[in-house]
Amino acid sequence: MKFGYMNRVSIMAFCIAVIVNATGDVSAAEVPPGTALQIGAGGSDVTTLDPHRATTSTDKPLIGLMFNGLVRFRPGSADPKDLEPDLAERWETSTDGRVLTFFIRKGVKFHGNWGTLTADDVVYSLTRAADPSRSSFAADFAPVESIAKVDEYTVRIVLKYPDPNVLGRLSNYHGGNIVCKRAVEELGDKFASNPVGTGPFAFSEHETQRHVKLVANEGYFRGRPQISNIVYRTIPSDSARELAFSSGELDVIQGRREQRWVDTTRQRSNMVVDVFRPGEFRTLHINSSIPPLDDLRVRQAIAAAINVDDLVQFVGKAVSLKGCSVVPPSYIGEDCSSGAYAYDPVKAKALLAEAGHPNGLTLKVVVSNISAILPTMEIIQRQLARAGIKLEMSVVDHATYQSQIRGNASALVFYGAARFPVADTYLTEFYHSRSSIGTTTAVANFSHCDVADAEIQAARVEGSVERQQELWKEAQRKIHDTVCSVPLFELQQVWGHSKRVNYGYELKGAMNLAPPITEATTLTPR
């Protein structure tokens, strides 16, 4: 009897391993459980490990493990009030707010044999981050007039105008990450697949569509991490990640961002579920560069045909927050005075008829197959169909989706993003014409919106807080009236971890969209 039971257990374990390998390529034989922290992330693969180019939710968590900024968000927080020293021991700000002097930690070593951090690396990194030909975050550095080395461990940054959000731009997030000058120059294009930073973990290996391996940075300036190494597995299938967690092959996983999943998992699983901010603000961008979407009436019809309340109800109020503007909820400068678009399918049909489409129209749309996107787009597809707008959806893997929407291949782009929480960041990246997809300075303006350029630029250099708020308000009004996009909801981050994992901090937020693994994180042996 006992022998038969053990055989059944062995067979079951073997079947689980086979299933997981078939769907997500998670193999316990590669890295024995307990020797590493095993993380299961969504997405089919990482896109880049260059911190100045990494924009996807699959890439960002890895960047956060390998790089530092001059300042950092305290682990477990995404609140700008919690910014603290990182590679800079301290800094001084001039009385007019335009000159910041940073004093760099001495003795901070880069991963491998790439030497020690100096002011040259900081100047190089921030100059690179401000260069649109080398960075996806150049717009964040528009307020910067100059970046200069004072001495080996001192850097001076001069601003064109006082910027209350400058420390956020210099944090361990996006363009604020500091790279090794020598490594970038010697590796060239290979740096994106062989990153060199100063963070608690160093790059070891990337196996395409399987995993990225990191090892503890023995010389980390805050102390050697207690986790020896990390295996960051890309597993697009939600069920495969959950099955791998249940079988003990994963310690931390990206969960389903759905109320039902969160509630059910908390009730019947040994998984600790974390729901935290910043949420990615879900927006339906309308590509006005292609007909018939260049007609305002058609864009208005799309907005009137979408019932955002139903979308929020589907996702769940515990993991989502309805938006009222193109600027995400709680961002500094968010203004809701224009109001959300009213759901009115009858009006939508009338607008289409007025625009010359009495029998409706068909739009070709590229959609990611991940659970945070596809189910919501299927609901939007049904809602639009009731108004006579048919979506021909091409469902592709997430990496292909990211590539195709940046190739202007989709009439509508359902996109979610979390950024530094100030209106300028979001307006610049998603609604300034210089950020339009297809331009040499492209970021993520999938709508090809240009109506608020003047207000966005003026607000950026405005010294008066009150006037800056007015300019942001006017920008949001213009974008709303032009229907560049339909704001939907902010979707919170949902991750789960084993009770064996102790992050070493209270998790309330994470700008890199995943729980940070720090030098204080521990994994209790089985």
Image (cartoon, grey):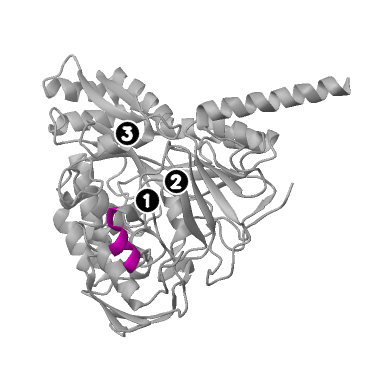
Q: Looking at the picture, which amino acid does disc 1 mark? A: Ser
Answer whether labels 2 and 3 touch (C-beta < 8 Å). no
Q: Which residues are magenta?
A: 182-189
Q: Looking at the picture, which amino acid does disc 3 mark? A: Thr
**At 22% from the left edge and 23% from the top edge, which residue is drawn?**
363
Is residue 314 visible to us here?
A: yes
| CA distance for labels 2 and 1 | 8 Å
* Horizontal side, residue 27 vs residue 490: left or right: right
Locate the N terminus and report the quarter of the image it occupies.
top right
Q: Looking at the picture, which amino acid does disc 2 mark? A: His
Q: Mark 3: which secondary structure?
A: helix
Q: Residue furthest right?
A: 1
Dominant SS of magenta comes to helix
Answer whether labels 2 and 1 touch (C-beta < 8 Å). yes
- Looking at the rendered structure, which numbered label has been put on residue 206? 2
- Tell me the crowding category of disc 2: few under 14, some 14 to 19, or many 20 or more residues within 10 angstroms, Cα based: some
Is residue 64 or residue 420 the one in the foreground? 64
Q: In the picture, residue 350 is in which quadrant?
A: top left
- Looking at the rendered structure, which numbered label has been put on residue 418? none
Among the two numbered marks 2 and 3 on one chain, the one whose residue lies closer to the N terminus: 2
| CA distance for labels 3 and 1 | 19 Å
> Can you identify the residue that label 1 sits on?
193
Is residue 512 visible to us here?
A: no
> Can you identify the residue that label 3 sits on?
400
